[in-house]
Image (cartoon, grey):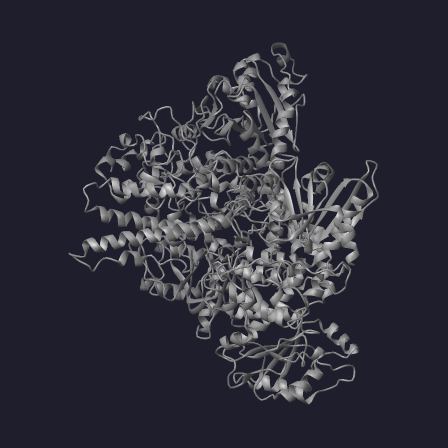
């Protein structure tokens, strides 16, 4: 494989990045203009202020201090005339394309204000040549992207070597894994003030929940991932289940994913536990240890003599799994347990649904049939089922004070969605920025949601049946919650969009790999390093910290909306009419400033009247109760 | 009071509604301001018919969800719910028709009870075989009130109140409206009270000559005059008494024009865009026989208004829904949102979106907004006259003309401005509210909620531009609900003529005399069965202060326009030579705008068509088509607007907002929202819990803005108290404000400049100088930013303000911040005195 690069290299001009200052705004170090950012960051650079438009199409204009070797197509001066980007909204645009090992950057040359396109190659799902050379000798190729858009470029046919090069360079760097190269995250060397990998520590998170306690203990049985290689090393299990028995339980659960604690109710001690399906099979196999285990989970909660098992799948699918050795808990074998199917479909149905959604929203939207087209994608219906499932779980735990066990087939897709959403509803801590990071680290990353397979980082096999938008659905559900409870979340929409952008970007190590065991934290930067170093970008000004409140969203389709700010953000017409985000910030600043002023003046008054009557001072300020406490 | 109770408890003996009415009438007035022992504040003459204790009311998402316990009442006017811990009502306060949890009997459409295993629709003649656990009232305004009876509620009370409500809610038959009016407003006290009410002086009622003159002045519209040619409704029965026509046309000439238009609705001036274009509306042409030369000359002058160069006729018939379309869409929407009431079957969730689409309600909103956007961009971009033409000029032209003004005129986005607008373009212009709402249920063919469609469109604008509206969706909702109450003079007539007829009969107080709002002494001899009706804008009468406070939000102040030169931004002769060249004798070109394209069909103006020979003889046919490309460019620019905004616009907050810039809505499928707070209020959900702030009613930004405002007030307060020790009383608060403004200059658009003296002065420290208000309005303090035009001419004559021009209310309404007092070139007479105080 090295031979390719040595063949290719001579064709390129080798550069160090700052010269690619096209993109690099001189300062704000980590400014990340979100694609739907409503207003440009305050930048002094004339270029960036002139090219507000780029932001529409820009994923990130990170600070480009990272030093990497980039490959710019040779003879840029010649390419200037030749590369055309077919924007579905504006039309053909001519400009220069620059491809680095991280991104594709297109800068339009014949348009004012400047138009630019900055695309991390990780977003590319496939690169295809479109048609043959046309009469004018143009070569055209399309990029199908994972973030609900497609891009099309064309350039004049040039000497054969060069034409091949663009395509090949894209094929090579967009799919490093398929080419035996490293994913860019391993080369990204940005240093952030905070190390995001330290955000979540399993033990301290359990400690926050009060674990270990008299019913639950922390076990190190999986310390070297020998019990279950897709589980984290630290697990919380019932006290009266010794490690030896855990191993026998693991034998009965698919992929060894035994029931373990995700969350415990601080008062009722009702718990949310997660696992994979039992290996019941067609013969209805039973496991004494597994039955004892679930009994132990139930016993750990004195408030209830029942246990709810939520199987995320439709019952038909669950039954069909028996043929493959899996299945579900029979209520005969598990006394006092009640099994509920949540009817959430599998990864393939979800993938198809998102594909349809993309067809409906990109690039053109049919206004007169918009709603029925949207309906036909079933996307919102799936969102509803997931939210409804999580709501039932949260309701059982909160209102019913009953412990629940959640699983699907392997317990790493739908189970992640359900437990994390239920925890988000139940525990206000997860609704803070850090809490949400912990939630993702714990329920998704450490419990082995297979990000590598579901997203296909750097893999050119775009038809892989393992790919599925499971995580996107989860973030969509979170967004739905933020819509219904605008003051309950510390983070804003930008936070969610940023997470999804970096789900694909391959800039950070967070979403790489399939499990905690595989993840190489030391060699990459965590997304949370980046996010936590500029929290103001991601903070919801209306957050009120009422951590003890449980959210019960309305899950009827009547109350769900399509997340326009994510799925239709590429359409310039969908731009919000008002920079509300900006106004939030300004109001907060204004309020802080005025509060300060009032305080100062108040103090002055107090000082002056101190001699006469010191009593009445101070009260007027207190009479204003700020609507919220967070600034 | 106790007598009331005893009588009402024996009510069950009376089953006939008629009997009931008699009893109440005989009773009314004896106990004015009566109060039930359970704390319900009754209107004078209102009596409690039945009561149930220990009832819980289900709260909507807006109210914070959950349950509220209290007592349920049924009176002869409303179903009232009084929460347990509500404060003791003040007996001396003015009566308020509806409490926060009340519903008027006339709003109720269906009464449904839920029993142990069943749901039953209760009709006046129903008898129940079970004790209801839940009482659900489906209202015509799409509210659903749900009451839960506790086990502690006596069964007898449960049954009785259910029967009582079922018997007394407005049965859909003629005559019930009147009895409902009498129940609420019919008592002697109530009549007296209503007669003594002054009407809101902050809005323009468009009833008198001076009202219209004020509007002309506000818009800076010169070249127009108010004609009273229709004073006795002889020219047109459906037009108001006063109409605005070109100055050049004399009344005698004008009179000849009426015959050429359907219902005599000749082209009339509605509004002038600050860039100088005029908006007109008219009915279709009729009687297309033109004899005299003068006839045609006048018609042309009326059509072209003050712009003799170009006129665009916008035909509203072909692209907008017809009233029956709207009616059908709305009834589908109702059915969808409320579900089938009696069977409680509703559209399954998985069909929700397509069913919503098939109601076409959103489509219709979109088409109205689209049409209005086209007109707004025309007015904004060119210098011409736009005449909206609709067959009878009483439905869609109301929608479009008022939407255009909401888009273009910031004044119309304030509560009072909006009320003035509705008064101008709907109430006075003769929208047939009475028939369209069909209060008496006797004319289903005419029923069509055109006004509700308009409110939906305004809501769409509001939701896309939340910070550009001073009115809130709470206000729109209140207006939406009031439509369904047959109590308001604004809606209980089809035109001003009918309204006048009624009030003449009554001699009641809401009729102005030549624009002076001094009230007549109530005519005590008026027929007791016919109470005086208040206008819908008398919100104090309708809602508690608590609710009214949420009608408005602080808005960033739009910087006023550059000083207007003769009321017209474009009158600079250099910029538009065309206008000069064309004298009033040569009519210009006229175009038809239809389906997004311009044309100039030969028969557009019937008198110019070939069949009418008179025109050709005397008039040179203006070459018309050369202007088409220019106009089409304008429209294209609009179509691309959403686009260019997305691509090129530097976000607005950086600079001051251009007040001329119309609020053009995005109209793509995903941009058309459903007004959930209105239409889905009835969709009750199982969730009985919410985050305390979840239902935070005001837009979060509003809340924060209010907080900032509070702090500013605080600051003003504190700084005055600081200043009390200083010799310079005046300078201090002003300086504070000026400083704040300077801060806000740095990129914030929140309170860009100029909230300053007008507010801080009279309020924080009423200085001795403020009595001489006129002179104090000299040059602003040097520290103030130069946003505001300085009126060098202290007398203000000849100056026109487009924005908040009619802002006399500043001092009167301390809670309002958006009227810069100093902007007011000429204070309306009625108000001048309040400032001097």
- Residue B68 locus on image (x, y percent): 44, 66
- Residue B450 locus on image (x, y percent): 56, 42
- Residue B320 locus on image (x, y percent): 63, 38
Res B786 seen here:
yes
The foreground one among A181 and A498 is A181
Res B523 seen here:
no
The foreground one among B377 and A416 is A416
Q: Is residue B251 above or below residue B275?
A: above
Q: Is residue B134 above or below residue B436?
A: below
Q: What residue is shown at x 73% (from left), y 43% (from top)?
A: A74
Q: Is residue B380 above or below residue A589?
A: above
Q: What residue is shown at x 66% (from left), y 23% (from top)?
A: B600
Q: In screen coordinates, is A283 left or right of A120?
A: right
Q: Residue furthest top?
A: B617
The foreground one among B102 and B441 is B102
The foreground one among B478 and B708 is B708
Q: In screen coordinates, is B523 left or right of B109?
A: left
* Numbered label tally: 0
- Residue B535 locus on image (x, y percent): 42, 42
Q: Residue furthest left?
A: A612
Q: Quadrant of the N terminus of chain B?
A: bottom left
The picture quadrant where one finds residue B647 is: top right
Q: Quadrant of the C terminus of chain B?
A: top left
The picture quadrant where one finds residue A244 is: bottom right
């Amino acid at each position: 494989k090295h031979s390719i690069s040595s063949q290719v290299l001579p064709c390129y001009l080798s550069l160090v990045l700052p010269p690619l200052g096209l993109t690099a705004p001189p300062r704000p170090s980590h400014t990340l203009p979100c694609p739907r950012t409503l207003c440009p960051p305050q930048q002094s650079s004339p270029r960036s202020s002139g090219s507000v438009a780029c932001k529409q199409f820009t994923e990130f204009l990170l600070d480009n201090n990272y030093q990497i070797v980039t490959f710019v197509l040779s003879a840029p001066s010649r390419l200037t005339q030749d590369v055309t980007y077919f924007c579905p909204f504006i039309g053909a645009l001519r400009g220069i394309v620059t491809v680095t090992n991280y991104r594709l950057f297109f800068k339009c040359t014949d348009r004012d204000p400047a138009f630019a396109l900055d695309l991390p190659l990780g977003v590319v799902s496939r690169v295809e040549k479109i048609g043959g050379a046309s009469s004018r000798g143009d070569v055209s190729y399309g990029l199908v992207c994972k973030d609900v858009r497609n891009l099309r470029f064309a350039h004049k046919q040039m000497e054969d070597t060069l034409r091949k090069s663009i395509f090949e360079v894209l094929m090579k760097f967009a799919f490093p894994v398929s080419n035996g190269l490293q994913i860019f995250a391993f080369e990204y060397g940005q240093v952030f003030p905070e190390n995001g990998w330290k955000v979540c520590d399993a033990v301290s998170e359990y400690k926050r929940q009060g674990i270990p306690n008299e019913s639950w203990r922390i076990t190190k049985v999986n310390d070297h991932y020998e019990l279950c290689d897709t589980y984290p090393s630290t697990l919380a299990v019932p006290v009266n289940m010794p490690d030896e028995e855990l191993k026998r339980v693991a034998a009965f659960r698919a992929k060894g994913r035994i029931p373990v604690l995700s969350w415990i109710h601080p008062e009722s001690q009702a718990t949310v536990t997660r696992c994979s399906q039992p290996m019941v099979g067609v013969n209805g196999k039973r496991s004494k240890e597994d039955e004892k285990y679930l009994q132990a989970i139930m016993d750990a909660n004195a408030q209830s003599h029942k246990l709810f098992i939520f199987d995320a799948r439709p019952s038909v699918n669950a039954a069909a799994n028996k043929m493959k050795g899996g299945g579900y808990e029979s209520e005969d074998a598990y006394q006092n347990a009640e099994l509920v199917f949540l009817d959430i479909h599998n990864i393939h149905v979800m993938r198809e649904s998102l594909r349809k959604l993309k067809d409906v929203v990109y690039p053109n939207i049919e206004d007169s049939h918009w709603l029925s087209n949207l309906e036909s994608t079933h996307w919102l219906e799936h969102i509803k089922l997931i939210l409804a499932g999580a709501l039932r779980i949260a309701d059982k735990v909160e209102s019913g004070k009953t412990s629940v066990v959640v699983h699907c087939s392997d317990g790493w897709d739908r189970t992640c969605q359900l437990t994390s959403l239920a925890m988000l509803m139940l525990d206000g801590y997860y609704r803070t920025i850090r809490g949400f990071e912990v939630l993702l680290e714990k329920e998704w990353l450490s419990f082995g949601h297979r990000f590598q397979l579901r997203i296909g980082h750097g893999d050119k096999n775009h038809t892989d049946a393992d790919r599925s938008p499971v995580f996107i659905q989860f973030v969509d559900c979170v967004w739905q919650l933020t819509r219904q409870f605008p003051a309950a979340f510390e983070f804003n929409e930008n936070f969610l969009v940023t997470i999804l952008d970096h789900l694909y970007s391959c800039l950070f190590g967070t979403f790489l790999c399939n499990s905690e065991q595989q993840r190489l934290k030391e060699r990459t930067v965590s997304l949370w390093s980046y996010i936590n170093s500029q929290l103001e970008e991601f903070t919801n000004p209306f957050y009120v910290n009422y951590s003890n409140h449980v959210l019960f969203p309305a899950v009827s389709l009547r109350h769900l909306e399509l997340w326009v700010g994510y799925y239709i953000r590429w359409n310039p017409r969908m731009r919000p009419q008002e920079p509300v985000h900006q106004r939030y910030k300004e109001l907060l600043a204004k309020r802080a400033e005025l509060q300060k002023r009032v305080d100062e003046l108040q103090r002055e008054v107090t000082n002056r009247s101190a001699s006469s009557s010191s009593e009445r001072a101070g009260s007027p300020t207190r009479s204003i109760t700020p609507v919220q406490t967070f600034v | 009071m106790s007598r009331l109770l005893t009588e009402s408890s024996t009510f069950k003996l009376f089953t006939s509604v008629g009997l009931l009415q008699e009893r109440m009438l005989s009773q009314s007035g004896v106990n004015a301001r009566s109060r039930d022992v359970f704390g319900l504040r009754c209107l004078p003459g209102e009596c409690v018919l039945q009561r149930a204790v220990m009832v819980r009311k289900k709260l909507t998402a807006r109210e914070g969800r959950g349950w509220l316990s209290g007592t349920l009442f049924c009176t002869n006017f409303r179903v009232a719910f009084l929460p347990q811990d509500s404060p003791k009502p003040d007996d001396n306060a003015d009566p308020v028709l509806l409490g926060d949890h009340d519903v008027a009997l006339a709003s109720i459409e269906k009464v449904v009870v839920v029993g142990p295993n069943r749901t039953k629709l209760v009709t006046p003649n129903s008898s129940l075989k079970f004790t209801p656990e839940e009482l659900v009232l489906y209202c015509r305004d799409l509210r659903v009130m749900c009451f839960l009876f506790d086990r502690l509620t006596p069964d007898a009370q449960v049954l009785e109140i259910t029967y009582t409500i079922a018997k007394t809610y407005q049965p859909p038959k003629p005559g019930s409206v009147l009895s409902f009016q009498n129940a609420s407003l019919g008592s002697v006290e109530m009549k007296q009270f209503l007669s003594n009410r002054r009407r809101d002086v902050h809005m323009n009622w468009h009833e008198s000559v001076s009202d219209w003159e004020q509007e002309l002045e506000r818009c800076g519209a010169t070249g127009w005059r108010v004609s009273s040619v229709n004073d006795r409704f002889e020219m047109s029965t459906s037009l108001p008494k006063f109409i605005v026509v070109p100055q050049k046309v004399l009344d005698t000439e004008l009179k000849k024009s009426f015959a050429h238009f359907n219902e005599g609705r000749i082209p009339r001036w509605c509004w002038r865009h600050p860039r100088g274009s005029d908006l007109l509306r008219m009915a279709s042409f009729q009687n297309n026989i033109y004899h005299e030369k003068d006839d045609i000359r006048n018609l042309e002058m009326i059509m072209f208004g003050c712009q003799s160069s170009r006129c665009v006729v916008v035909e509203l018939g072909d692209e907008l829904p017809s009233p029956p379309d709207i009616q059908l869409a709305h009834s589908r929407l109702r059915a969808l949102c409320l579900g089938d009431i009696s069977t409680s079957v509703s559209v399954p969730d998985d069909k929700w979106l397509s069913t919503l689409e098939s109601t076409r309600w959103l489509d219709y909103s979109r088409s109205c907004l689209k049409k209005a956007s086209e007109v707004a961009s025309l007015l904004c971009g060119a210098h011409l006259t736009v005449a909206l033409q609709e067959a009878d000029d009483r439905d869609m032209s109301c929608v479009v003309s008022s939407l255009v003004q909401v888009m273009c005129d910031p004044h119309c986005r304030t509560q009072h401005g909006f009320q003035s607008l509705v008064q101008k373009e709907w109430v006075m212009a003769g929208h047939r509210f009475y028939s369209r709402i069909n209060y008496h249920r006797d004319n289903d063919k005419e029923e069509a909620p055109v006004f509700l469609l308009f409110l939906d469109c305004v809501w769409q604008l509001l939701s896309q531009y939340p910070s550009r509206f001073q009115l809130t969706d709470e206000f729109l909702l209140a207006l939406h609900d009031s439509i369904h109450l047959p109590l308001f003079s604004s809606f209980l007539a089809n035109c001003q003529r009918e309204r006048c007829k009624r009030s003449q009969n009554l001699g009641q107080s809401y009729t102005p005399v030549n624009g002076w709002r001094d009230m007549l002494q109530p005519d005590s001899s008026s027929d007791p069965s016919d109470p005086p009706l208040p206008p819908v804008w008398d919100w104090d009468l309708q809602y508690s202060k608590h609710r009214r406070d949420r009608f408005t939000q602080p808005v960033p102040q739009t910087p006023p326009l550059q000083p207007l030169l003769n009321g017209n931004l474009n009158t600079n002769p250099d910029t538009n030579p065309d206008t000069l060249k064309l004298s009033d004798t040569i009519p210009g070109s006229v175009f038809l705008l239809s389906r997004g394209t311009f044309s100039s069909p030969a028969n557009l103006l019937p008198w110019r068509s070939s069949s009418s020979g008179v025109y050709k003889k005397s008039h040179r046919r203006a070459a018309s088509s050369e202007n088409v490309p220019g106009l089409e460019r304008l429209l294209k620019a609009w179509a691309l607007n959403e686009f260019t905004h997305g691509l090129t616009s530097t976000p607005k907050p950086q600079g001051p907002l251009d007040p001329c810039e119309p609020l053009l809505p995005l109209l793509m499928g995903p941009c058309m929202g459903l007004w959930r707070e209105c239409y889905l209020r009835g969709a009750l959900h199982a969730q009985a819990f919410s985050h305390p702030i979840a239902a935070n009613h005001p837009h979060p930004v509003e809340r924060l803005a209010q907080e900032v405002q509070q702090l500013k007030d605080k600051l003003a307060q504190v700084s005055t108290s600081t200043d009390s020790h200083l010799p310079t009383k005046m300078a201090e608060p002003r300086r504070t404000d000026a400083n704040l403004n300077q801060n806000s200059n740095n990129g914030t658009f929140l309170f860009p400049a100029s909230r300053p003296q007008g507010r801080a002065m009279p309020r924080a420290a009423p200085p001795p100088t403020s009595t001489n208000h006129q002179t104090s309005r000299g040059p602003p303090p040097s520290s103030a930013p130069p946003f505001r035009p300085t009126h060098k001419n202290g007398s203000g004559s000849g100056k026109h303000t487009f924005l908040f021009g009619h802002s006399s209310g500043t001092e009167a309404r301390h809670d309002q911040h958006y009227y810069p007092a100093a902007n007011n070139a000429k204070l309306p007479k009625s108000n001048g005195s309040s400032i001097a105080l």
